[in-house]
Image: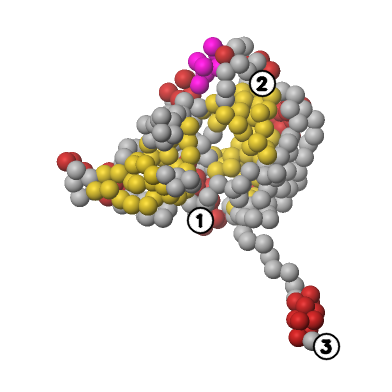
Amino acid sequence: MNLRVFLLLLLSCLPSLPSRAGEADLPPLMLATTYHDGLDVPDYWVSEKLDGVRGRWDGQRLITRTGQPIVPPRWFTAGWPNIPMDGELWIGRGRFDEVSGLVRAGAADDRAWRKVRFMVFDLPAQGGTFESRVLRMRTLLSATGIAWLQPVTQFHLANSTELEARLMQVAAGGGEGLVLHRRGALYRVGRSDDLIKYKLYEDAEARVVAHAPGKGKYTGLLGALVMQLPDGRRFRLGSGFSDAQRANPPPIGSLVTYRYNGLTSKGLPRFARFQRIRLDPPPPDPE
């Protein structure tokens, strides 16, 4: 037996290596596209876009959209239905950092988990139209009697004028925006025009490559982050920071989520504002 054949036989006996974390175990999620004019608004259920941590309950455990385990206290998921549920771990408007910290800490802070709700917005394995899934969510979750397991409130609006007014109302109250879900839509994995997010701003991620020093009242603090887009282009991100964040800015190399309002003539984000550090990169769109 020559050396090459021996090595091939040896390799065939070895157990296969596990995939990298978050690569093969990505949950099969339906993902939203961005709002555009011309939608037939009455054909959609509308809900508030909650600023929390998206989770998938597979019937046995909670995982993030990147496939990482979420480990709350045992009482939190006790009595949950043993069917898949898409939802958002949510405390309230403007409290993303709080719920994100709890998810990272796991079950360590039992008392803090008492503030968290799992807001269910879909039943991926239920089948049928979204309208039928909404009705099923309401009866299913009501029957559990679990106060922190709730369906996201879904409602109808008559036209785009009412939709715009509701968006302004939500934004004025500190909400992130709205989600529109076509009434007759099936659950399909990947980006879908049947599921639409509607916000006053857009958001995206970029990498911190440098810190620009502040001037005037910000002398000795951060003036702006120098950000690098996935295509290599750079821009400065100088607003949206608290004084504490300017004193202790996101480290070089970290991934940051920022808000912006459209693009400049050079294709760079217009009126970009810091939102938060992104601790896990967004997963690739499922196929």
Q: Mark 2 = which residue? A: 44
Magenta stretch, overall SS: helix
**Label 1 SS:** helix
- Compared across the picture, whether 20 is left or right of 245 comes to right
Which corner quadrant of the image does residue 25 belong to?
bottom right
Q: Mark 1 = which residue? A: 105
Distance of mark 2 from mark 1, alpha carbons?
37 Å
- Camera-side residue: 244 or 210? 210
| Amino acid found under the numbered disc labelled 2 | Tyr
Instruction: Find residue 1 and name its label.
Output: 3
Q: Is residue 43 magenta?
A: no
| Among numbered discs 3 and 2, the one appearing first in the sequence | 3
Residue 217 locus on image (x, y percent): 18, 41
For the magenta stretch, what is the residue range? Answer: 161-167
User: At x 65% / y 36%, what residue is drawn?
Assistant: 191
User: At x 47% / y 20%, what residue is drawn?
Assistant: 168
- Compared across the picture, whether 16 is left or right of 228 comes to right
Distance of mark 3 from mark 2, alpha carbons?
68 Å
User: At x 41% / y 29%, what residue is drawn?
Assistant: 265
- Camera-side residue: 268 or 150? 268
| Amino acid found under the numbered disc labelled 3 | Met
